[in-house]
Image: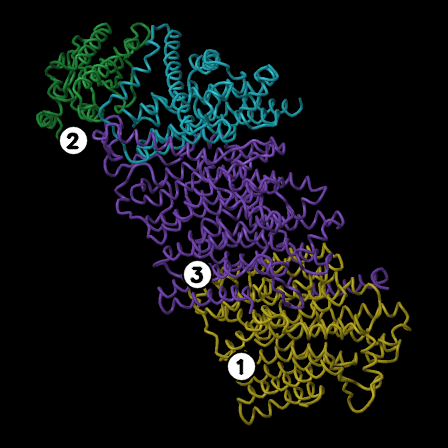
Amino acid sequence: MINDKSSQKIVDIIQNWARKQSIWVLAYGTGCGAIEIPPTMTSRYDAERLGVRGAATPRQADVLLITGYLTTKTLKRVIRVYEQMQDPKYVIGFGSCTINGGMYYDSYNTIKVLDKYLPVDVYINGCMPRPESVLSGFGKLQELISEGKANGAQEYKDNLEWYRANQKRIIPNWVMPDYNW
Amino acid sequence: MVGTPVLLVVIPLLAAFLIPLLGMIWKELVRIIPGLVLLYMFILSATLLNQVLHTGPIVEVIAGWRPPLGINLVFSPFSGFLVTLMTFIGLMVWIYSYRFKQNVDFEPAKKYFILLMMLVTGSVGIVLTGDIFNLFVFIEIVGISAYALTAFYTERNSAEAAFKYLFMGALASTFLLLAIMIIYTQLGTLNMADIASKMPEMNTTYKITALVFLLTAIGIEAEMFPLNGWAADAYTESPGPIGAAFAGIVAKAGVYAMVRIIFTMFDVDGTMQFMLYIGLITLIVAETTALRQDRLKRMLAYSSIGQMGLIMVAFGIGTAEGVFAALFLMFNHAIIKPLLFFSGSYLVYNSKDKFIHETNGMGKHIPITSILFALGAFAIVGLPPFAGFWSKLSILTAAADENMIIIIALILIVSIIELVYYLRVVNRIYFFKMAEGVEPKKPTLNALFVMVTLGVIILLVGFYPDAITGVLHKASGDLLDKTKYIQDVLLLNP
Amino acid sequence: MDSIWYKILGVVVSFILAFIVGMTYMGLSRKIIARVQNRKGPPFYQNFIDAMKLYSKSTAIHHGLMQHLGPAFIMVSSIMTLMIVPVLNDGKWFPNLNFDGDLIFLLYIMVFGPLGMALGAGQTGNPNSAIGVTRGLSQMVGFEIPWVMALVALMMQFKTTSIVDLMEVQAQSGTWLMFSSPFAFIAAVLAMLGMFRYSPFDIVGAPTELASGPVSENGGKYLFTLMSSGAVFAFAKLTLYVDLFMGGADNLIVLLLKTFAIYLIPMLYGVVSPRYRTEQAIRYFWGWPTFFGLLAILHAVFF
Amino acid sequence: MDMIYLIFLIFLSGAVISWLAGKVNHVLQDILFLASVIVPSVLFYMNVSVGQEVHFKAGGIDLSWGITDFGWIFSLIVLGLGVLAAIYSVGFMKGKERRGYFYFNYVLSIMSMLGILFSKDFVSFFIFWEIMTWSSYLMVIYNGKHTQSIGIKYFIFSAIGAYAMLMAIVISHSVTGNFMIADLITAYPVLSFNLQLLIPILLLVGFGVKAALMPLHVWAPGAYSNSPMAYTSVFSGALSKMGVYGLSIVMLSMISHLPEGFWFREVLAWMGAITAAIGTLWAVKQDDAKKLLAYSSVAQLGYIVTGIAIGTELSILAGLFLAVMHAIFKSTLFMAVGAIERQTGTTNFTEVTGLIRKMPWTFLASLMSIIALAGIPPLGGFVGKWMLYESLITSDHYMLIILVFFSSTAAFLYCYKFLFGFFLGQEEKEWAHVKEAPVLMVIPMLVLAGLSFVLGTFPGLILKPIDAGMQALGFAPTNQHLWDTSILFNSWGNQVALQPILYAILGIFVVFTIFLTIKGYKNTRYVTTKDISSSGEVPKEHENLTFSINFFQPFMRAVEPVMRRQIDKYYNGFANGLEALFDFTRKIYTGNGQTYAIYVILFLIIMLLIKNNVFG
């Protein structure tokens, strides 16, 4: 029955609906953007009503939120955390720094374009992006999920060599178990 | 018929005096003759005992004078049993001390063996004699030889110990003589049986005074508290085998004399209780003291005193079971304590002041001696299935039948203390590292033979107590039957 | 009628019921907590969605056999509890195992699962899991004492150790035990605070210190199983309380009302109180709750 | 020659021969050792029937040997465990030194325990008791120097107990006139009240030492944890049960027939419960597996004593059943520790972790035994615990049950600590080389674990003999018709049916195991314990993230006031005080001649003064 096409489609629709309704965010504050998460979560904006909720460990999380600039030092951890998350998983680039380096465009120890290293599904620009825009970013992610277009994890699998190459360029001493799914 | 009881006294005396002369012929004879004599004594007493157990006791009259006038020797099951035991231990001591000290040259060896002979003779005499003055004489013989043996290593300590012993011994003989005088003035006889039969007519005050003097005098020999100050020093400073001889022979003779006086001669109430409680005090004080000793032989000495106290307690119970238990204890003590002294004196062979901590780690180097020491320790504490257990069980049973629960409790508590200090030594032997500069001495073959024999006896009695109990029952019955003793001695028909 | 298939059917039905009710209660609690914090809060069916999402997670990771089986262990204990506890008064509806086990058995089967789960958590090798487990066990030693005292009081008073008999007692006397033996009720409820692990007793899975403790390595189907078993377990425990102290329920509506009323207690207590440290929690349970337990026993003995 | 003599003869000779055979050949030695344990056991079950007796005299004392129904239960423990542990210890001792010593003492212990069960008279009972004591003492000091103080402590306590027993024995001889146990039991009800009190107290002290009863338990942790594990499984499993055997004889056939025995039972039950609580707390504290298990043995024996002391029919069943179960699972656990010690060289939780994939069978056995120990259904421990609680409730011991329940809840803590410390947690490179223990060691463990599983569902198997034994002691359980149906009743008529429970548990477990396994089977994968969510860090090979130090620190903080007081300290203080006192009394012997002479004179004078009060 699982192999059956039409039923598979229905199952996908239901699954995507569920996934979009419950987004567990791994609270991993990389940069200054992390300060925008508390207002987003708490009473003022209350992201939980959209099913967005913090998850303590990558095993349980669905979304990795890169809040702000990402130093080369942190990149390693972020990659590790991302690879520990279980499919389906999504990445949200948060703030201008993750898009083009932002105010750190010439910094020697932050990575400029996050997409080179992790498959970003949604970017939220702004420096800082206000909670409203964060919420809209989540909304965008939900749309993508329900349309089944949020397949960054798949990309990451497909062009793993490329990503690895970029990552290794930044991280000189590469001691990480290889990512084999 | 190998001989008569009198030979038991005469032969060793003769031998003792002949040894020097024979020694002039061939030096080795000095060492050999005593052995032969002791062997003969042992065989003789054993055969006599065997005979006596079936027929009645033998009463030997010296020089044809009938009792109560003449001197007589009584070889009853009780005394015979003790004599056999003593001669056996004497033989063991001889075998052991043959070549005990290589460095002992001719002269001391001569002295040593003569004195040993005298010691055994005196003790045997004490047990055999039926005449109270004779008893005094034999006690003197034992005393003199014992002083000399204590001072054998002519060193400061041994001299001091000998002096103490001599001092107390002198007191003992004085009081004994006093007591004898009182009795003689009152009853006009020196024969024990006669005294026993005439005792009722004696004036109570004189009787009790005499009894007190006797008890004091004999108590010194029998290591009774508080008269046993000499004992520890004497045991410690005399040569190893002599300690065994003291424990196995002399002390037994002392207890015998005391028992003979209390059970046979005097008919005073309260003597039993006196013996019971004084024995108990002796036991407790001695064992608690032994717990705190730091010298091996001293510890053994105090433990030996404690055993004597226990024997007194057993006698003091006064019932047939009590006497049986006492005899059993005497037997076990006479077997086990020599074993402890023998093996112990090899454990601290080369050390000057014989500290306990000098036995550390001996278990590796002289295993047989160590295991035998451990065996003796466990046996004397009374762990089954060794010999000591049965005697302890019998004394406790005897006490329980008299509802002396407190006394049972005290005895058991004391034996826990005993266990503690023996266990300490055994642990040192097996678990501690040997100190620097201590070179263990391998026991000579004859010593090994002696120790193994005693160990085998312990195990044998432990697994098959019936081997000994029959004799003990007969002996205890004999001791308790006072009228029979009197009849045997006085109305004996030629 | 009492064939094995009938029993199994009863188990399945009561399981589904318990699952639904438990999930709904959790959702409601989230909603209520949100409202207390002046938020809109997720819809009350949010937990179903989360469960579906977790179920639909495509990959799952485990660190070994024990972790793989841990959820099964805990499922065993929750469903066994559910089977022992009579769901409705007349035992006909879900007569699962009500007569085959009694309170003592219940006490032990209720710790079966946590221990199995603890083994699973242990094998992940994540220090947080082990720490969470030790906290959980310590806290369990804490709240079991007043809980057992309450139960012992009831058993002593009515000379029975069976839940069904206790419900009988209430049916006959007409009064609920929470009124006829109030101290036992108080002690049991205070113990329940620890049992439900809401704040201030959420030291086991404290998200901000322990990264959700024992379950920190579980995701996907494992987390789904744990979640649903938690729901079933919650419902079973609530039903137990209702049966013991509120005279059971004659039909589902009453059951839901009563269980929810009980459920509000730990939840509302949790909303307004911060987290304890472990030894503080233990001392708390050995304080007033134990005192009330003693009172209950005295009451049971002397009245 | 009677078969009974033959059995003991084989034991004795086997002990000596299997020692000496070590000089010849080790394989031969092992075979002889196994033979000298197994052959007598087989002979026993083949040829010795209950009620068969032999009489003989030693030292003028009538002795008689024979097995009773009650002893037969314990003979199951002794011989069954003896044989299995013997097989285990052959594997355990391979390549170790002083095997002869070990085998000798092992066989002697088994023999003495069987002898205790055989003795119908106090003398042989005492003799075998002492043989048991010193053979186990020699085992305790097997490891040499550092164990000698522990050995002394064990021996002294055993001696205290043994001498108390001896006192009781001679007192009973004084009232009955012989040493037969049966005669004492028959004479007991008509004794004077003091003796009725004194004899059981003394006997209880004697047995309480071996049963590690508070406050006589201080020897147990050291002794259990320092003797070789292969022996400790027997030591804690069977040898401690000898104390239980004696206790239960005293309680069931003496105290229970005594109208004033009520206080006795209460006090003993409380002592048992307190033992359980304290033992458990200390077990939780330990970081060394041996010590942990030792303390937990103390605690378990506490339950058993409580059950026997309560004296109702169900509680006695509970106590004896727990005794059997404890023999099974605790010996399994000690064997597991022995296997781990043999394979890794340490038994410290803080050092060795993550053995589950290295030693799976050992883990399985330990898991079963731990579940049984914790008393969790469906394994055997639960049956005993259930019966214990029910008996406590139905006999109105409401405070006692709280204490017992507290200790058995706190037991979960060390149960988990044991499993986690050894088998779970991070898998370390340091222990990558570890292999599963030799098959000779694994098989006995698995057999015992299987036993505890079977008894959990069909307790009737063992409850029947226990029932017979209780009838032999004058108890008549009322519901023995239920032994086959594996439904347990308490005296209020409440029941727990074990078979449905077992099937339900297995069913649910299987269902969800299948679900977890087949759901997304392809995408489910195993990752190493280094691959954990440690906030993005990759633990290095040498970093061990396992949490094993101060494992239950918060709990320990909570119960700290209780743990502060140790009985050990009081004992040591008492002993030191005594030594000081004796050191003072020793000064009586000044070593000075004049003083001694003065003693003599004083003695004489005092005697002369009081002579008329003393004599005449």
How many badges with numbers are in the image? 3
Mark 2: amino acid = Asn
* In this view, the mark in front (3 or 1): 3
Quarter of the image for the C terminus of chain D: give it. Answer: bottom right
Q: Nearer the viewer, residue C3 or B296?
A: C3
Three-letter code for the amino acid on which mark 3 is drawn: Tyr
Q: Is residue D579 above or below residue D271?
A: below
Name the quadrant of the N terminus of chain D.
Answer: bottom right
Mark drawn on residue D103: 3
Assess disc 2: are there few (<14), some (14-19) or many (≥20) residues with their C-alpha within 10 Å of its C-alpha. Answer: few
Foreground: disc 2 or disc 1: 2
- Residue type (three-letter) at the residue carrying disc 1: Tyr
Local crowd at mark 3 within 10 Å, few (<14), some, or many (≥20)? many
Q: Which residue is mark 1?
A: B98
The letter of the cyan chain is C
Asked whether, in this view, residue B381 is left or right of residue A3, the answer is right
User: What color scheme is it?
Assistant: by chain
> Where does residue D87 sit, x and y in percent of width and height?
40, 56
Which shade is chain B?
A: yellow
Q: Do the residues bearing badges 2 and 1 touch, measured as CB atoms within 8 Å?
A: no
Q: Secondary structure at mark 1?
A: loop
Whole-percent x and y of residue D356? Answer: 32, 41
Q: Chain of mark 3?
A: D
Badge 3 marks a residue whose secondary structure is: helix
